[in-house]
Image (cartoon, coloured by chain):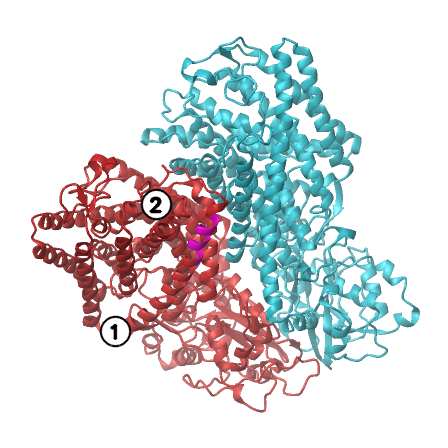
Chain colours: A red, B cyan
Amino acid sequence: MEEEQSPRLGRDPATEPSPAPEWPDSDSKNDDSANDPEDPAGGSGSGSGNGISSLEQPLLKRSTTLTASHLAIVGAKVSHIESLDYEIIENDLFKHDWRSRSNVEVLQYIFLKWAMAFLVGLLTGVIASLINLAIENISGLKMLQMVNLVRGKRYWAGFLYFAGVNFALTFVAAVLCVVFAPTAAGPGIPEIKAYLNGVDTPNMFGAPQLIVKIIGSIGAVSSGMDLGKEGPLVHIGACLANLLSQGGEGRWRLRWRWLRYFNNDRDRRDLITCGASSGVCAAFRAPVGGVLFALEEVATWWRSALLWRTFFSTATVVVVLRGFIEVCRDGRCGMFGEGGLILFDVSDVTVRYHVGDLLPVTLVGVLGGVLGALYNHVLHQVLRLYNLINAKGRLAKLALALAVSVFTSAGLYLLPFAVPCTPCDPAFGDACPTVGKSGNFKQFNCPTGYYNDLASLLHATNVDATRNIFSTGTAGEFRLDSLLIFFGIYCVLGLFTFGIAVPSGLFLPIILMGSAYGRILALVLARFVRIDHGLYAVLGAAALMSGSMRMTVSLCVIFLELTNNLLLLPITMFVLLIAKTVGDAFNPSIYEIILDLKGLPFLEPKPETWMKDLAVGELAAAKPRVVTLQVIEKVSTVVEVLRSTPHNGFPVLDWPRPGVSELHGLVLRSHLMAVLKKRWFLTDKRRTEEWEARERFSSTELAEKSGSIDEVAVQLTPEELDMYIDLHPFTNTTPYTVVETMSVAKAVVLFRTCALRHMLIIPKFQGPEIAPIVGILTRQDLRAHNILGAFPHLANKRKVH
Amino acid sequence: MEEEQSPRLGRDPATEPSPAPEWPDSDSKNDDSANDPEDPAGGSGSGSGNGISSLEQPLLKRSTTLTASHLAIVGAKVSHIESLDYEIIENDLFKHDWRSRSNVEVLQYIFLKWAMAFLVGLLTGVIASLINLAIENISGLKMLQMVNLVRGKRYWAGFLYFAGVNFALTFVAAVLCVVFAPTAAGPGIPEIKAYLNGVDTPNMFGAPQLIVKIIGSIGAVSSGMDLGKEGPLVHIGACLANLLSQGGEGRWRLRWRWLRYFNNDRDRRDLITCGASSGVCAAFRAPVGGVLFALEEVATWWRSALLWRTFFSTATVVVVLRGFIEVCRDGRCGMFGEGGLILFDVSDVTVRYHVGDLLPVTLVGVLGGVLGALYNHVLHQVLRLYNLINAKGRLAKLALALAVSVFTSAGLYLLPFAVPCTPCDPAFGDACPTVGKSGNFKQFNCPTGYYNDLASLLHATNVDATRNIFSTGTAGEFRLDSLLIFFGIYCVLGLFTFGIAVPSGLFLPIILMGSAYGRILALVLARFVRIDHGLYAVLGAAALMSGSMRMTVSLCVIFLELTNNLLLLPITMFVLLIAKTVGDAFNPSIYEIILDLKGLPFLEPKPETWMKDLAVGELAAAKPRVVTLQVIEKVSTVVEVLRSTPHNGFPVLDWPRPGVSELHGLVLRSHLMAVLKKRWFLTDKRRTEEWEARERFSSTELAEKSGSIDEVAVQLTPEELDMYIDLHPFTNTTPYTVVETMSVAKAVVLFRTCALRHMLIIPKFQGPEIAPIVGILTRQDLRAHNILGAFPHLANKRKVH
């Protein structure tokens, strides 16, 4: 786990073309020239101290150096994080590799890409179906037994049974999560978002995470806690994609030759996008919604080719889901198999709306936005608190999860006793009351002919509860006080369940809260609302989702595919837009809050306005000196550089003739490590022929992640350390460069749109004694928070928009 | 109409820092050093002739210079085209402008963006509704009268009446198109696609185009020709967006202060994207489909903020459309107003499909792909032929349009006589036969109790015909021979109607053809197909659309919103994917073919593989020398440069001290023109203070398009010509630069992802006597076709993928 390259300023090498340029101590963060009062021009005057008239004056005085943290919260621990390399490394070896690719290999690559997309869809579909099967059977059996005890008036036994089973299920989920895969807790969507933005969270997409997520999800959702399997399914899709692209995990990796095509961050990124879409699709049975979710919320870079491929994955998922439903239709799968492909079908209602509905619909949106923002705010505080608790160790995490489970069980079991029984409307016939099966009118503790409306909502899986509350044509089914109790308990549970150490999704808790809110509003505004109460519940859920998650098109399509009522689309759109606008006025989306809380260095799409006031040269000057290498470098120097710095990329300089210097390119730490491991050293300073390196290094070897430098360095003899390395074949000769006067705002856009990891800063001037490189910028250096740390004056310039 | 910047090589200025660098004659395309045998290193060794060892050898010998055409077919004429400037021009004046923006102004800007998106949606919705109203009433009346004549056995009178009315309607549409706005012919979608890619087609989005498109669409569609109003509606949306952002057209422009926020290509581009989505939404009543169409097919750059805004526009459109439908429900709008928001509702069928359906569904996809590709191929040939005819002049264009109209009328009127009458199925009751209204079973020339199935398809508006052929539960309604005749005539009409000089869309012709193909296939495979024939027709239409247009997700959602049957989604997805894959194996999509035919320099998302083998330095060396300016330049020099070159951007160089040169930035032609117009000259060579320029030039003035240099130059006195211009305030000091060794493939990706207009090439070496600029690249230089002209050897390296 090395750190990101955040290198030091290298002005000297050009002026003194010495073979081994000096570099400062490894851990000195304050030893650079940035604080040097004799260098007021900052990074802009690189190399030539004398004043130059046309040189742009720096707009601000720097106050401290630019320091960047490479730490983030992974699971509950603070870990080092790494950036991903989406740039094409155009070095000699790479160029030779693709030039030598035959047409057959190109076709293999294309075939493999599609086959992988298919496999990701297939496996996600199968796993999602199995998870559903398990959850519905486990919670179905649990509920049946509990209801039987209650019907026999054995209330305490019922409670103990209910709470006990829930406790055991939570225990399984939490122990797995705490012991084997702490990163499997939570939804995993923020980490996927970060991955697709270029941040690799360690131990996130491996086999332990996948297995814990599957079993943990089953346990946690069956235990009746207020969490969904939607987020975990997205994570499962991403894990599957990652494992497939690597051919497995660690020691058990498949060494299939074809897999080398996926041995790069770009193709892996594409596949993980497919996995995330498949997960959403499997969760909501929404193929188009899945693609759009990946597009709108998860992915940072998008292209048409990817649209097509993710679409293929989700189509596969839907076919698998349909197949399972078809197989289970006649009761072969226990309690699973009711309902078709549409999760919450409300298509039986013909929607008619008029100008008069505008007001109540706007109200749903506005209040939804406010509630969503409030939810984000409070959840943020709860997560901070939970982070403190979870950091105390495994037992604390376990205890927290189990406490929430007990609290949930008590709430769900006891609250229905607090409401009176409702007589069945004879119009519903046999459907009311429902005993021993899923249905709208749970009898629970009521006499025959009566039902307990709160039990219908609380004594059901979360999906069934949503289905009940969305049910149309049932305006009088739920009493206002029951709905208020339901809303209240789910608000509390939704806030206090999310941060515990079990796989948990955010979608369903918010949908449950939102649907209750919608129904309540419908009852309160009954005189003004002419829309069916079930549809109003759908609108409420959409509003709260949008108010919290701030998605628009993808949510709209997901809701469309969930409810199968196209005529609802225009009002859903308006509610979503209103709720998002209102929510955005208060705070960022819940995923952004979580990303920020975890400290993941996510690059926002839009640069801050004040970034236009800062030049990249100034930014580079606020950093330690850049560590550069010579194009033919001593082994000992390379070892020392690798050992003393955590950087991942080093600019390579050359002096082809006196007075003329050249930025030859950028060499990656992993490639240097590969050279050291292979001991590809030269006895004298000479430039090697292209074939020499090509014979020794395969592109697969170079694509491997590098290990620790210390292990490698210790094996080198003093003679070897005195030898030379020719970096020509390994140097990416065309790294992305910007001129030092470019504004940070523009650089950020370039960095993000081109998905860079390193951005080299070159001097503005052309002349003798000017070093060919001014500095190097990485993701951390371009984050607003870090820049403001070094340039606090800029904070005052923050503006709207 | 100036040309794109395609400038010349400027190596000299650095070595001889003379105030006025020489530049070659204006029209000499072959006078550069590129063909000079004494300069084998190409652009890579810029300035220093002596060999440098580490210099990368050029991979290929250049054979000719890189020439680029700036011409494209606009309307039917060959015109100059211009690139758009999506880059932020960071010069002093711009920086001052945004720094001085108050919070109120920022809020104004945000408000205006949303208000414009709303207005675009509103107006598109209203215009689309009015067009529908007009078309349905005109063609309804026409059909009624014709049917009355036929029922009175006055067949010849019926034909003359029918053909005559069609002729007159076509005449109106074609005359308007030919005389007032030749660019209004066709769908306009390729030009919108090009605009959003950065190519401005002249006279494309103005008021004449808007008006002609509206009236022309009504005329052309009512005349019964095989064309749709869908493409034109997209163009109408784009025109509305453009006019709104400019505050109107030419002399009648609104000079509202707030509109200055839209005085740049970026914001205009966003609004035109909203317009295009609104158009699709209005055409298909598909709000999500409209957004996705813009995303997948039309737009080149996309971001989340745009997703949200286009979504808002389409939501507005839907509300307007619903409003109109609501108003017209009780017959107040003549023949308009039947049907709801769903255009081709097939939601009454419960779709059930099994493994056995896989084969027929695959067949629909494969054949649809083949037919789509074939259609593209033949249409390409027809369009080439039509281009020759249309180039002959206005009368030829008019005659062609009228000939197609007469041919169409004859086909539509006469063919139903060729098929026998079908007895009505008593199950349909009063619905069969339909007389005097729209319906499935047109009686036409048949006795009571019988209907003419071909007349049901041919004697209806295209939308009604589609509705009839999509109608479900009517497996035996259409005879195979009628369908074959229908398919045949619409294949011929679809190929020969598209290129004529009237506004015409491609969607509906392809849907008609495809639905007929689907029904035919269903009848042929009747023994194997268990899916409803109407649904099979939907699948056929989707397959043909995908086979021709190669869209996936957006088509899928459009079909979903057209037919309102969510259960159809998975098979539609598979059919679309198969058809696209099959089609892609043969030729590019129809829009790409049209773009290519028109010669619009569209930048493809993916660079060609052989581009990795070429360095940008070599590309620059194959071009004429770059024309550079000094940062304080003589007026006469500026005038001469502007007069003798058609370029739009000029690198600005500076020599702050002996031996040190600097690429100060890039200055735009329009800004130079503004300086000349204002006569902001200096008597001596001095650097002005920032406020001096700021006082004289407003950002609004600088954003204006420049006029002709000759008009301005002629007004300058000899004294003025001897004065100086300080370019500091106007120079964009941070243009995007690449190092000369970067591969063209990487440069193309950078150019496209960052939406550039000019890309400067800087030298690899740092040292004395090295010019700070090697060359400049523009859109034309990076197009595969143009590069292959200069480097024909590369063509042999073309590979799959």
Q: Is A27 placed above or below B192 here?
A: below
Q: Are marks 2 and 1 on the same chain?
A: yes
Q: Amino acid at mark 2?
A: Gly
In this rendering, the count of numbered labels is 2
Give the percent coordinates (x, y) of residue A25: 43, 86
Query: Which residue is under mark 1?
Result: A389
Q: In the visual, does B224 lie left or right of B695?
A: left
Q: Are marks 2 and 1 in contact (CB under 8 Å)?
A: no
Could you tell me what secondary structure mostly forms the magenta stretch? helix
Mark closer to the chain start, 2 or 1? 1
In the rendering, at what x and y percent does residue A55 appear? 67, 80
Vertical relation: B21 (above or below) B553 = below
Q: Which mark is residue A534?
A: 2
**Label 1, residues with CA under 10 Å away: few <14, some 14-19, many ≥20:** some
- Numbered range of the magenta stretch: A358-366
Determine the chain carrying the residue at label 1.
A
Q: Nearer the viewer, residue B579 or B209?
A: B209
The answer to whether residue B54 is left or right of residue A134 is right
Does the rendering let one see residue B530? yes
Q: Is residue B27 magenta?
A: no
Residue type for callout 1: Ile
* Element type at mark 2: helix
Residue B101: x and y in percent read 63, 71
Q: Please name the residue shown 46% across and 64% down the image.
A: A692
- Magenta stretch contains residue A365: yes
Counting from the top left corner in percent of width and height, residue B153 is at: 63, 8
The residue that appears at 87% across and 63% down in the rendered structure is B713
